[in-house]
Image (cartoon, grey):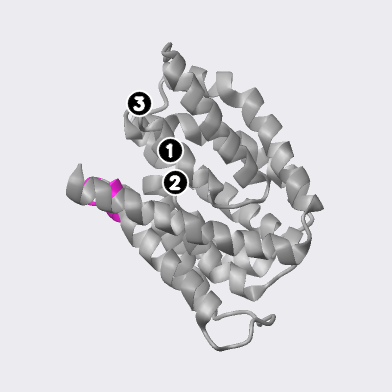
Amino acid sequence: MPTDPIFYIAACIAVTFLGLAKGGFAGVGLVATPLLSLVVPPVQAIAIVLPILLVQDAVSLWVYWRDWDKWNVKVMTLGAFIGVSAAWALAAHVSDAQVRLAVGLIALIFVLNYWFAPAPKKERGRPHAAAGVFWGGVSAFTSTLSHAGGPPFQIYVLPQRMAKLRFVGTATVFFALVNYMKLVPFFALGQFSAANIETSLVLMPLAIATNFLGVWLVRITPTEIFYRIAYGLVFLIALALIESGVHDLFFA
């Protein structure tokens, strides 16, 4: 288990963002793995984060179990099986930086189109199921390789303008399923060592507390403001992913 105080400072910040993300502000948790990767190897960072995510998923499922869209979860989960499998098969050939850059560019185009396209921003019907399978696969693929599954999920679900708690509940159920799928490849990689599990357990109380903080913040935030925040977060995260991917690919 790490003993460096710098690691625990970084880990506490990362876990706080994870808790807010699992509480309902999807996307802010993207900073967790890159932040931990500054102080431990990236694969170890992902392995430490995953058990924390599983516990936070359990808390969020308990909170949002009555508020989720079964149709969206069903079609996206079909793609998620493919996405996790593809990530496992291609892990040795696709770098984390390439994944971050691609996700960032896609998310940036999505938000700019929403903000500046001439079409009115009104509630829309369900998109095609095939699109759900595709974006579910992309989300699971990027989540497995880089814990960056939020933007692809939001590209598919945000335009549906579903009720605030229903949107959060749908994200909660989908990513809980994806995270449990990810257990297989990470066990195969041998990253669930006793030291990594012990580190995750030390951070767990903070993870649960910040999870409930995220739930509270979502519930007191008006729906329209919540969606403005959601799109704003996707935009900022897209810029961060692009910057990080470009830096690691061309300047590291």
Q: Which residues are magenta?
A: 92-98
Identify the secondary structure beneath mark 3: loop
Task: In the rendered structure, find residue 33 and report the number of the disc placed on it.
Answer: 1
Marks 3 and 1 sit apart, C-alpha to C-alpha, by 10 Å
CA distance separating discs 2 and 3? 16 Å
Q: Nearer the viewer, residue 124 or 82?
A: 124
Does the rendering let one see residue 81? no
| Vertical order, 28 against 39 (above or below) | below
Residue 93 magenta-highlighted: yes
Residue bearing mark 3: 40
Which of disc 2 and disc 1 is earlier in sequence?
1
Seen at 73% across and 38% down, the residue is 212
Residue pointed to by mark 2: 147
Task: Name the quadrant of the N terminus.
Answer: top left
Do we see residue 172 in this rendering? yes
Q: Which is more foreground, mark 1 or mark 2? A: 1
Which of the 4 image quarters holds residue 83?
Answer: bottom left
**136 lies left or right of 166:** left
Could you say where residue 135 lies in the image, as x and y percent from the top left?
47, 67
Q: Measure how far apart labels 1 and 2 are at the Cα level.
A: 7 Å
Q: Is residue 131 left or right of residue 158?
A: left
Measured along the vertical axis of the image, is residue 15 above or below residue 162?
Answer: above
Residue at 49% x, 61% y: name it: 235
**Residue 230 magenta-highlighted:** no
* Among the 4 quarters of the image, the one containing residue 222: bottom right
Q: Amino acid at mark 3?
A: Val
Amino acid at dot 2: His
Horizontal and vertical percent position of residue 173: 64, 53
Q: Amino acid at mark 1?
A: Thr
Give the percent coordinates (x, y) of residue 130. Answer: 48, 77
Disc nearest the viewer among 2 and 3: 3
Q: Which residue: 55% across, 88% down?
A: 118
